[in-house]
Image (cartoon, rainbow, N blue to C red):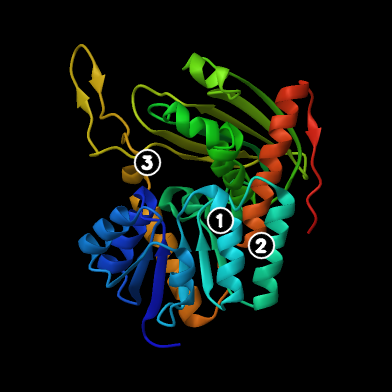
Amino acid sequence: MSEQIGIGIIGAGRIGQLHADNLVCRIPQANVTAIADVYIDAAHKCAKQCHIPNVFDEPRRLIEDPQVDAVLICSSTNTHAELIIEAAQAGKHIFCEKPIDFQIKTIDRALEAVKKAGVKLQIGFNRRFDPGFKHARDTVAAGKIGVPHMVRITSRDPEPPPIEYVKVSGGLFLDMTIHDFDMCRYLLGEEISRIYAQGSSLVNPEIGRAGDIDTAIVTLTYESGAFCTIDNSRQAVYGYDQRVEVFGSEGCIIIGNPTPYNGTLCTQSRVEQPLPLYFFIERYNVSFLEEMRHFVKCVQEDTVPAVSGRDGKIPVMMGMAARESLETGLPVSIAIAG
């Protein structure tokens, strides 16, 4: 492999633009040669901003481009699996945003194509690359809190997405909680055996009328018998609320919210601290950069990505089990093969 990796980006929306900027401006080992989007104006705009030489309105043309060694799939979820298959068959390494698909059979078909082609696949669970969450994982793995007993994950958005997005999102569990399902596995390095979910629509009645929820609590049981609780809300008026805690036999590790600055005002009448960061791109700007550095390094050095296709499949299984639990009002057992 050459010093630089030729990369093509499919999807010129918000996340595609973010990755393009990181790759072009901050990762010298990457050479973004092309971008594709069915909305060609969006592709041209991103190409102009990031000095990307080739623009396509058809992903197939980008995948077939001999200058492209690796493909970033940042398009809508309904396109992910087929694009993975096409890229794999063309011998391209693949980074794909979550989720791979909403159907397990379709995910399996995509993963089989990757395996057959022998290419690399990394799924975009960027929160694994957040310095705070990685510190929590490393602390647990080092045995510094003893045997883990309980995990608490808080994940709350500052405001709900547009209702038209909600209708095609796959629902809260596969759109939002999916990150937390991945995080509960990541923090302990252990699989889940049972899921119990409760939820309702408390933020926006339109979300409920669309058949989804905006507020949820999910209780998960690890195979070891430890527990994890996840609480989600589509609206935290004070900012983007993202926290984790792992409690064990010898202590606990707590990761709080980053703020715009580290300062505390203390007066006779109050103690005042800055609010959390408001937007997910600000909150996870470091993790987005680090996940892309990791992907490029894996391609360059022929190593296995830390977030595999299997890691992309299991949170979808967990999301489906959570939905079943919500609908039945009962815990749902989940068997995850090694």
Q: Residue 280: which numbered mark, if any?
A: 3
Q: In the picture, residue 31 is in which quadrant?
A: bottom left
- Quick one: label 1 or label 3, which is nearer the N terminus? 1
Alpha carbon distance from label 1 to label 3: 22 Å
The residue beneath circle 1 is 80
Q: Between residue 49 and residue 323, name the one nearer to us.
A: 49
The amino acid type of the residue labelled 3 equals Phe
- Quick one: label 2 or label 1, which is nearer the N terminus? 1
Instruction: Using the image, determine if residue 108 lies above or below residue 294.
Output: above
In the structure shown, which secondary structural element does the residue marked by tag 2 occupy?
A: helix
The amino acid type of the residue labelled 2 equals Ala
Instruction: Using the image, determine if residue 329 lies above or below residue 338.
Output: above
In the structure shown, which secondary structural element does the residue marked by tag 1 occupy?
A: helix
Q: Measuring 47% from the left and 36% from the top, which residue is drawn there?
A: 243
Q: Position of residue 218 (x, y in %)?
A: 65, 29
Q: On the rendered structure, is 205 left or right of 315? A: left
In the structure shown, which secondary structural element does the residue marked by tag 3 occupy?
A: helix
- Closer to us: mark 1 or mark 3? 1
Q: Residue furthest toward the bottom?
A: 2
The amino acid type of the residue labelled 1 equals His
The residue beneath circle 2 is 110
- Quick one: label 2 or label 3, which is nearer the N terminus? 2
